[in-house]
Amino acid sequence: MTRHDGCPSPLIKKRDFPVEHVRRYLEPGPIVLVSSHWRGRDNVMTMGWHLVMEFSPSLIGCVISSANHSHDMIRRSRECVINLPTTALTDTVVRIGNCTGAEVDKFETFGLTRQPASQVQAPLIGECHASFECRLHDTRMIKRYDLFVFEVVQAHVAARPKHPETLHYTGDGTFVVAGEVISRRALFRPGML
């Protein structure tokens, strides 16, 4: 095995690790802010459990606990916006996750800008680097696993930076930040990118 700089990688000594903490290493991607709209009310939740399931149509799986206020709003409206914050919103991301939209208007409380979406009723968050408008695509795993499968129907992304500093949650109140960009595009076969 070789490192990203082409030098051989040394073997790594491992230790036993508590299985309930593997999320520290397996969180699938950046923390996102999910905005929703139902019956004249908007909400925002912090979420880390999501995955890309298909490229075309663009399908995203999201675990949204039934204990979360957004769960019912999104299940009923069948839509949401997945917004990508950068490190500039770190404290806001944590504070949004520490309260419930059943009690506070998170847009007002945290000074977030609602922007109209073009395909769904849920608002975009103006301070986020990207916003993906989503419609519920498959409901079969919601009741059993709280797993929503969405189709991204419209995407909005800032032109710069191309690779924003995003937050990745590792548990215990700790985040890591997306690091240096390592390109190996030349090694990929066409169609495998």
Image (cartoon, helix red, strand yellow):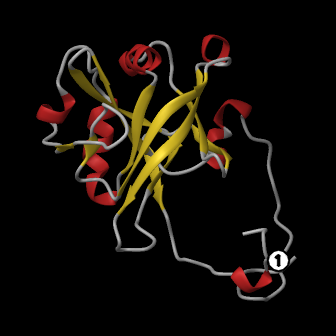
Would residue 34 appear left or right of 139 to someone viewing this image? left
Question: Disc 1 marks which residue?
Answer: 189
Q: Tell me the residue at 13%/42% (across/down).
A: 111
Q: Tell me the residue at 61%/19% (across/down).
A: 139
Q: Tell me the residue at 28%/27% (across/down).
A: 43
Q: In the image, residue 22 lies at what x, y percent?
A: 68, 40
Task: Identify the residue at the far bottom of this view.
Answer: 6
Residue 74 sits in quarter: top left
Would residue 124 appear left or right of 139 to someone viewing this image? left
Q: In the image, residue 136 lies at what x, y percent?
A: 53, 28
Residue 2 sits in quarter: bottom right
In depth, the one of 24 and 97 nearer the eye is 97
- Give the secondary structure at mark 1: loop
In the rendered image of this protein, does residue 68 appear above or below residue 109? above
Would residue 32 appear left or right of 59 to someone viewing this image? left
Q: Mark 1: few, some, or many residues within 10 Å (few <14, many ≥20)?
A: few
Q: Tell me the residue at 64%/36% (across/down).
A: 21
**Quarter of the image with the N terminus in it:** bottom right
Q: In the image, residue 90 lies at what x, y percent?
A: 31, 50
**Quarter of the image with the C terminus in it:** bottom right
Q: How many marks?
A: 1
- What's under tag 1, amino acid-wise? Arg
In the rendered image of this protein, does residue 126 appear above or below residue 69? below
In depth, the one of 87 and 54 nearer the eye is 54
